Amino acid sequence: MLVVWLEEKKLNAHPMNPVPFLKLRQHPPMVALKTAPADIRFPSTNQTRHCFARYVEYHRCIREKGDEAPECEKFARYYRSLCPSEWIDKWNEQRELGTFAGPL
């Protein structure tokens, strides 16, 4: 999406015509930021369980469908937007060591 708006340039106004000229100015495209959608299983503001559930859902999905499965990418986006990176690092380490407590 290209955002363009009009900007008044008062310095360009001519003495015989005091109305300022309008100049078009372009801005870089906007980036769409997305987060996990609301989940009725987690109605409170504390999203700890929601974060954990999305992390587990993602790893179940890639275990069943493979690392490159596009349908698993939404779960990755969800848990990355909900979970603190320290938790993700800790859980990844636990999975590698075989000590992760979640039902994968």
Image: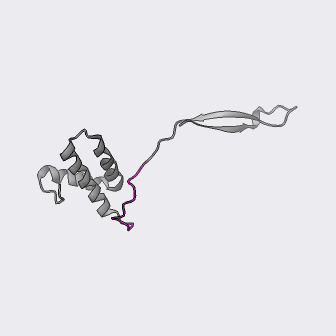
| Near-viewer residue (81 or 58) | 58
Counting every numbered tag in the picture gives 0
Q: Identify which residue is drawn at 30% across, 58% down.
A: 51
- Give x and y (percent) for residue 69: 26, 40
Q: Is residue 46 left or right of residue 29?
A: left
Q: Is residue 100 left or right of residue 8?
A: left
| Near-viewer residue (100 or 57) | 57
**Stretch in magenta:** 34-45
Compared to 93, does 68 lie above or below? above
Q: Identify which residue is drawn at 34% across, 51% down.
A: 78
Is 46 part of what is drawn in magenta? no
Question: Which quadrant is home to the C terminus?
Answer: bottom left
Q: Is residue 23 left or right of residue 39?
A: right
- In the current view of this chain or complex, which residue is farthest to the left? 98
- Give x and y (percent) for residue 70: 30, 40
Q: Is residue 93 left or right of residue 45?
A: left
Q: Identify which residue is drawn at 84% across, 36% down.
A: 18
Compared to 103, does 96 lie above or below? above
| Near-viewer residue (33 or 10) | 33
Majority secondary structure in the magenta region: loop
- Give x and y (percent) for residue 44: 38, 68
